[in-house]
């Protein structure tokens, strides 16, 4: 009996070293702000879908993925929302999702960061996204902010009134 218990312990200890925590999003928001004609325009997307496999001490085998539905964009002005869904901006009819997928995750000072493939309007670029991770029991929060150049993704054309950079904030609460 002692041999069976010892063998079980020796089997499960290495297996536990490779275990990751899979987090299921319980809520999340993706918001943005950008200057247009000197005024800061704010908005948000809904329709967030995530796959979060993350353990702070196992970053090399962690993986963060998310997507959101372009057609859910809201800025508080219906006409502007309709324009943003059009082909000049996000072309929601052709490109249904904005997608983000980690390539590599790492520590960066007191926070974390990752190199992510970001796909907007069919264009994929690698973007570093710094983020905070906090865990309390079986609940966690992922919070990040990143500046994205809209022109890198063909959003909005070459207008002189709209800034090139949009500040994006991501906040996802999850449970294991």
Image: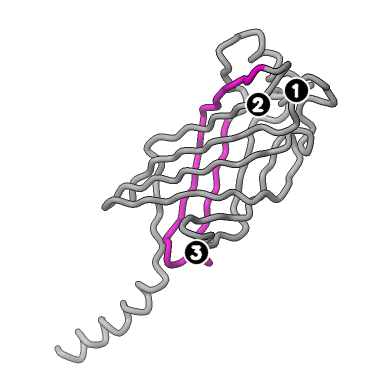
Residue 140 appears left or right of 52: left
Residue 104 figure quarter: bottom right
Q: Looking at this view, is 151 or 139 the one in front? A: 151
Closer to the chain start, of discs 1 and 2, is 2
Instruction: Find out whether the residues at labels 1 and 2 contact each other: C-beta distance under 8 Å.
Output: yes
Within 10 Å of the Cα at label 3, are there few (<14), some (14-19), or many (20+) other Cα atoms? Answer: some
Q: Which mark is residue 114?
A: none
Q: Looking at this view, is 135 or 10 the one in front? A: 135
Within 10 Å of the Cα at label 2, are there few (<14), some (14-19), or many (20+) other Cα atoms? Answer: many
Within 10 Å of the Cα at label 1, are there few (<14), some (14-19), or many (20+) other Cα atoms? Answer: some
Rounded to the nearest whole Å, what is the CA distance between mark 1 and mark 2? 8 Å
Residue 91 appears left or right of 21: right
Residue at 45% from the left image edge and 57% from the top image edge: 54
Mark 3: secondary structure: helix
Q: Which residue is mark 3?
A: 59
Residue 15 figure quarter: bottom left
Is 61 drawn above or below residue 147 in the view shown? Answer: below
Residue 144: where, in percent of width, then height? 51, 43
Rounded to the nearest whole Å, what is the CA distance between mark 2 and mark 3? 32 Å
In the rendered image, which quarter contains the N terminus? Answer: bottom left
Residue at 59% from the left image edge and 35% from the top image edge: 168
- Secondary structure, magenta segment, majority class: strand
Q: Which mark is residue 162?
A: 1
Q: Is residue 45 magenta?
A: yes
Residue 165: where, in percent of width, then height? 71, 33
Q: Residue furthest front?
A: 38
Q: Is residue 53 magenta?
A: yes
Residue at 61% from the left image edge and 9% from the top image edge: 78
Residue 58: where, in percent of width, then height? 45, 67
Residue at 57% from the left image edge and 18% from the top image edge: 74
Q: Which mark is residue 34?
A: 2
């Amino acid at each position: 009996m002692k041999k069976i218990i010892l063998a079980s312990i020796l089997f499960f200890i290495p297996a536990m070293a490779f275990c990751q925590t899979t987090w299921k999003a319980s809520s999340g928001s993706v918001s943005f702000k950008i200057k247009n004609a000197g005024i800061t325009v704010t908005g948000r997307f809904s329709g967030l879908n995530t796959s979060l496999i993350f353990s702070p001490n196992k970053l090399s085998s962690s993986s963060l993925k998310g997507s959101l539905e372009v057609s859910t964009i809201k800025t508080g002005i219906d006409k502007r929302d309709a324009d943003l869904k059009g082909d000049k901006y996000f072309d929601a009819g052709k490109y249904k999702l904005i997608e983000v997928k980690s390539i590599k995750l790492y520590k960066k000072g007191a926070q974390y960061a990752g190199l992510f493939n970001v796909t907007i309007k069919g264009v994929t670029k690698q973007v570093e996204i710094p983020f905070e991770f906090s865990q309390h029991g079986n609940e966690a929060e992922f919070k990040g902010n990143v500046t994205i150049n809209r022109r890198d993704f063909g959003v909005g054309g070459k207008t002189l009134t709209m800034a090139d950079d949009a500040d994006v904030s991501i906040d996802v609460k999850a449970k294991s």
